[in-house]
Amino acid sequence: MSAHRAYVGIGANTGDASWNVRRALAALRDLGTLVRRSSLYRTQPWGRTDQAPFVNAVALLETTYDPHALLAAFKAIEVRLGRIAGERWGPRAIDLDLLTYDDRTLDEPGLRLPHPSMGDRAFVLVPLAEIDASYEPLRDALADSALHGVERLAEPTS
């Protein structure tokens, strides 16, 4: 089987959000090869703004999973890491989003590729452009007000 390249958006804003994102990054290694990952970023909540800031990152995963199996694996990781079903855009212990999968385009119930809102979200585009320069134009097209709430976090070196 050949490997596919998938960009994964990761976010959390409950508990130790930075730790939850790092745990999710580690869990992705069970699904393939973690080729690159961005820094962690503190970002302002999107959609529902009356909640704690998020910690976000993006990873490039090489995997043999097809998009549907990968999405199912993401949901299992979320449950294992403490995600509880809640309101849309609400607080969460962890969130894994399949942003892109190779150059595939899909529009099915529950799975749209590329992720339909990624081009509007600084919390996706800033970390994504950090690890893939081809996304810099999309990041740079965001309004300054959108970029203002994105702050790179210092990470432990050990």
Image (tube, rainbow, N blue to C red):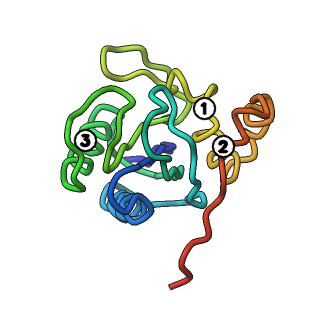
Are there few (<14), some (14-19), or many (20+) residues within 10 Å of tag 2? some
Whole-percent x and y of residue 120?
A: 63, 26
Whole-percent x and y of residue 135?
A: 71, 38
Name the secondary structure under disc 1. Answer: loop
Residues 77 and 123: in front is 123
Residue 29 as seen in the image, left or right of residue 151: left
Select label 2 or label 3 by which is in front.
Answer: 2
Q: Is residue 1 above or below residue 16?
A: above
Which quarter of the picture shows residue 24? bottom left
Residue 77 as seen in the image, left or right of residue 145: left
Residue 20 as seen in the image, left or right of residue 39: left
Residue 149 tag number = 2
Are there few (<14), some (14-19), or many (20+) residues within 10 Å of tag 1? some
**Residue at x-position 72% and y-position 39%:** 147
Residue 75 tag number = 3
**Residue at x-position 53% and y-position 78%:** 156
Name the secondary structure under disc 3. Answer: helix
Whole-percent x and y of residue 110?
A: 31, 21
Instruction: Please state which amino acid type lies under the numbered disc 1.
Output: Arg
Which sits earlier in the primary sequence, circle 2 or circle 3? Answer: 3
Which sits earlier in the primary sequence, circle 3 or circle 1? Answer: 3
Return the residue found at the far front: 50
Select label 3 or label 1 by which is in front.
Answer: 1
Which sits earlier in the primary sequence, circle 2 or circle 1? Answer: 1
Does the rendering let one see residue 60?
no
Does the rendering let one see residue 85?
yes
Name the secondary structure under disc 2. Answer: loop
Quickly name the residue at label 1.
121
Instruction: Please state which amino acid type lies under the numbered disc 2.
Output: Gly
Q: Is residue 157 above or below residue 89?
A: below
